[in-house]
Image: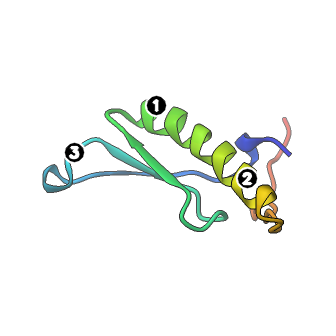
Amino acid sequence: MTQLEYEVVISPLSPEDGGGFAAVVPDLPGCMSDGETPEEAVSNVLDAIGAWIEAAQDLGRAVPPPSRRLVSA
């Protein structure tokens, strides 16, 4: 399973929240990151996905599979 299989939801952050963009992974509770641009937020959240999976495995917890099926071209 690769990190790119997980759905990532990108949303703008308000100026009060520092601006930029938030990236959230709905399938992995608490897994999120942010960035100045949507691309930076995605890049940062890929690192967060890897850390989330590693922490879950270190704790002996199951890593949920992606809820969305990717369609191959």
Residue at label 3?
19
Q: Where is residue 50 in the image (x, y as percent from the top left)?
A: 68, 43
Question: Hey, which quadrant is residue 58 in on the image?
Answer: bottom right
Viewer-closest of 48 and 10: 48
Q: Across the whole image, how many numbered discs are drawn on residues?
A: 3
Amino acid at dot 1? Glu
Amino acid at dot 3? Gly
Nearer the viewer's eye, disc 2 or disc 1? 2
Question: Hey, which quadrant is residue 31 in on the image?
Answer: bottom right
Amino acid at dot 2? Ile
Viewer-closest of 70 and 39: 39
Element under label 2? Answer: helix
Q: Which residue is drawn at 19% across and 47% down?
A: 18
- Mark closest to the chain's N terminus, 2 or 1: 1
Residue at label 2?
53
User: For residue 14, which numbered disc appears in the image?
Assistant: none
Contact, mark 2 vs mark 3 (Cβ under 8 Å): no
Question: Hey, which quadrant is residue 61 in on the image?
Answer: bottom right
User: For residue 39, which numbered disc appears in the image?
Assistant: 1
Q: Position of residue 20 (x, y in %)?
A: 28, 41
3D distance between C-alphas at marks 2 and 1 = 21 Å
- Mark closest to the chain's N terminus, 3 or 1: 3
Bin the neighbour count of mark 2 within 10 Å (Cα to Cα): few under 14, some 14-19, many 20 and up: some
